[in-house]
Image (cartoon, helix red, strand yellow):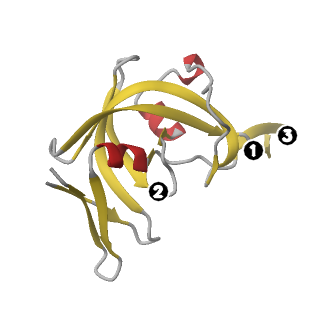
Amino acid sequence: MSVRLHLTSDNRVEVVGYLTSLEHGNAGPITFMMDTGSQRTILGPRDAEALGFRTSSFPRYAGPQLIGVGGRGSAFSAGVCEIILGDNEIVGDEEILYFMPGREKDVRSRDGGLRYVKRERTFQLPSVLGTGFLSKKKCVLSIDYGKMTGEILRHL
């Protein structure tokens, strides 16, 4: 069994899936970035918003602080979610973490002669499919950057 990967022009590897929250009831399509350096599966802020998660209700993650491509930040537990990759080729449950980077910046603007200062996040981590999920499902990545192709292979 295999699931096709998408290689972007900036060399990111992505896989399209479907995520269903078993605790919160949210569900929908999601594009995960493959990160072989991340063991945990992460729900990114944009996807959390698009799927209608109330992130303010997520409890803090009790594990160690996460440091990665999103920098340092706060991790929260989004609960156990079912992840479906491909056309049901790879299905499994996984505890998903929600990660919000802690850095913010001031954005200054003028409107009608008045000055406004608004705080905005400088970076939003995409959703990441961790290697822990792939390991539990006995999957390996096969990527050919020369041909810009790839797939997740599942050994039965």
Q: Mark 2 or mark 3, which is nearer the start of the sequence? A: 2
Among the two numbered marks 1 and 2 on one chain, the one whose residue lies closer to the N terminus: 2
Residue annotated with mark 2: 35
Q: Is residue 56 above or below residue 45?
A: above
- SS at mark 1 in the image: loop
For the N terminus, the quadrant is bottom left
Give the answer, above or below, for where 63 lies relative to 54: below
Q: Nearer the viewer, mark 3 or mark 2?
A: 2
Q: Distance between the residues labelled 3 and 2?
A: 46 Å
**Mark 2 is on which residue type?**
Asp
Task: Give the secondary structure at mark 2.
Answer: loop
Q: Give the class, few, some or many, for how many residues have Cα within 10 Å of label 3's Cα (few <14, many ≥20).
A: few
- Tell me if mark 1 has few (under 14), some (14-19) or many (20+) residues whose alpha carbon lies within 10 angstroms of its own: some
Residue 154's place in the image compared with 45, above or below, is below
Residue 76 on image: x %, y %: 58, 28
Q: Residues within 10 Å of mark 2 (few under 14, many from 20)?
A: some
Labelled pair 3, 1 in contact (Cβ < 8 Å): no
- Mark 1 touching mark 2, by CB under 8 A? no
Residue at 51% x, 40% y is 44
Residue, x 27% and y 44% (percent of image)? 137
From the viewer's perspective, is the residue at label 3 or at label 1 nearer?
Answer: 1
For this rendering, which residue is in front, 133 or 144?
133
- Percent across and percent down for residue 17 are 29, 44
Res. 25 image quadrant: top left
Q: Residue 144 falls in which quadrant of the image?
A: bottom left
Q: Mark 3 points at which residue?
A: 113
Which residue is drawn at the image coordinates 32% and 43% (left, top)?
A: 136
Disc 1 versus disc 2: nearer the observer: 2
Q: Which of marks 3 and 1 is nearer the N terminus?
A: 1
SS at badge 3: loop
Which residue carries the number 1 mark? 103
- Residue sticking out furthest to the bottom: 146
